């Protein structure tokens, strides 16, 4: 490496490629979440489906047919109409940034007495630690945004800064309009006039041991799965969407533990490993759809049972029905759309005008979470206080 260590490190920090450190030299990352939601949403589509350009995100949705179908007499006269179909929706881009920086002094003071080989090793260690922090911050922050409480001024309003969240689209409120929301538009589409712009909503009786031998939760799940399935047109099926089902059912730790309990108490024997002696259900499913533990739902304050005060609580209570929620999510119709030219972009290193000894790289992301069909997602929630809870 030629030049000063600082110049060399500036080039090194801007480089991309495989990790340079062996596992023995890794810094253990205790800041990761138990689970992340984005990879599960991506099951339903390719990266190409997530990319758009232009000044805003847009698409067209067909809510209801404009009928011209009629029976006629052989000698009847006809009048012809030209119905306009399709509703075009637009969603603004939301912008996010993060940065990584280093100084001449932190490099020089840590490598001044080291050999050339040792200095380079120190560069690699410092680079990895800084990028470890950067990408942990980005991943955790974007995952937090997915489960943020609905906020009209931050999400729906054009002047807002926050992307839409999953509970904005999939919730337990009347017509799917979050409590505290301004008006009845969600993603610019009026739920008051478009009845299909509402997610599936079912409840279980929280006072009747729904996860016990009554197995009420199974019946509610069965109703939800059927309500989220839509056939293709029997004639000209290419003019309809392929038949899909939710790709996963997101729930909290309480939700998945109680569901596993329901599986156990309603079976004559254990179905796990260990010769039928293991009570664990490693990958619980319902009708082939996995239940996925989403750690953010353990504490997500996204439920409001107190009207339009805009105060939200987690599923453990406080002005809201107590008990786990189950989100039936279809990645085909719930997408993190990113800008074609600004997807995880990193700037070249630069020095701020008043900090000549500092180098900075800036991350830039243009994206938003869009819902292409709300009626293909659903939420099963408690109708009252769930007891007992495991």
Image (cartoon, rainbow, N blue to C red):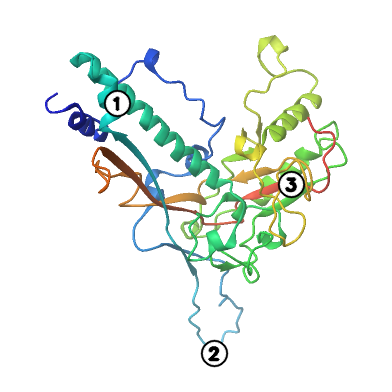
Image coords of residue 195 (percent x, y): 65, 66
Residue density around tag 3, few if under 14, some if 14–19, many if 20 or more, within 10 Å: many
Which of pointers 3 and 2 indicates the residue nearer the eye?
A: 3
The residue shown at (48%, 65%) is: 159
Please tell me the numbered disc located at residue 381: 3
The CA span between labels 1 and 2 is 73 Å
Whether the residues at callouts 3 and 2 have beta carbons within 8 Å, the answer is no
The residue shown at (63%, 67%) is: 182
Tell which circle, 3 or 1, labels the residue nearer the N-terminal end: 1
Tell which circle, 1 or 2, labels the residue nearer the N-terminal end: 1
Q: Please give the residue where the numbered disc 1 appears in the rendered image.
A: 18
Q: Is any atom of residue 92 visible in this view?
A: yes
When the figure is inspected, residue 218 is found, relative to residue 227, above or below; the finding is: above
Is 66 placed left or right of 302 in the picture?
A: left
Is 326 placed left or right of 185 in the picture?
A: right
Q: Quadrant of the N terminus?
A: top left
Is 19 placed left or right of 243 in the picture?
A: left
Q: Quadrant of the C terminus?
A: top right
Tell which circle, 3 or 2, labels the residue nearer the N-terminal end: 2
Image coords of residue 267 (percent x, y): 79, 24
């Amino acid at each position: 490496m030629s030049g000063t260590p600082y110049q060399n490190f500036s080039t090194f920090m801007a480089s991309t490629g495989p990790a340079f450190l062996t596992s023995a030299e890794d810094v253990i990352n205790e800041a990761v979440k138990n689970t992340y939601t984005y990879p599960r949403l991506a099951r339903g589509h390719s990266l190409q489906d997530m990319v758009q350009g232009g000044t805003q995100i847009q698409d067209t949705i067909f809510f209801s047919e404009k009928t011209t179908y009629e029976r006629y007499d052989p000698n009847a006269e006809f009048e012809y109409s030209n119905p306009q179909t399709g509703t075009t929706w637009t969603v603004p881009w939301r912008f996010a940034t993060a940065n990584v920086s280093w100084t001449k002094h932190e490099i020089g003071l840590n490598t001044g007495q080291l050999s050339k080989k040792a200095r380079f090793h120190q560069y690699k260690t410092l680079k990895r630690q800084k990028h470890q922090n950067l990408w942990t911050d980005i991943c955790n922050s974007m995952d937090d945004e997915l489960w943020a409480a609905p906020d009209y001024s931050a999400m729906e309003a054009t002047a807002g800064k926050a992307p839409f969240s999953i509970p904005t689209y999939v919730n337990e409120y009347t017509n799917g309009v979050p409590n505290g929301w301004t008006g009845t538009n969600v993603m610019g589409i009026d739920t008051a006039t478009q009845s299909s712009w509402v997610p599936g909503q079912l409840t279980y009786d929280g006072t009747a041991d729904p996860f016990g031998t009554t197995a009420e939760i199974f019946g509610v799940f069965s109703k939800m799965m059927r309500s989220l399935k839509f056939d293709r047109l029997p004639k000209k099926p290419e003019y309809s969407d392929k038949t899909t089902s939710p790709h996963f059912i997101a729930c909290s730790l309480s939700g998945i533990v109680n569901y596993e309990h329901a599986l156990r108490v309603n079976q004559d024997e254990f179905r796990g490993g260990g010769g039928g002696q293991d009570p664990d259900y490693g990958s619980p499913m319902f009708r082939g759809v996995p239940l996925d533990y989403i750690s953010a739902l353990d504490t997500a304050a996204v439920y409001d049972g107190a009207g339009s005060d805009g105060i939200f609580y987690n599923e453990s209570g406080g002005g809201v029905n107590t008990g786990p929620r189950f989100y039936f999510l279809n990645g085909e119709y719930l997408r993190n759309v990113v800008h074609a030219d600004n997807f995880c972009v990193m700037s070249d290193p630069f020095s701020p005008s008043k900090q000549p000894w500092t180098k900075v790289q800036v991350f830039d992301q243009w994206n938003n979470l869009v819902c292409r069909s709300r009626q293909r997602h659903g939420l099963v929630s408690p109708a009252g206080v769930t007891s007992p809870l495991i």
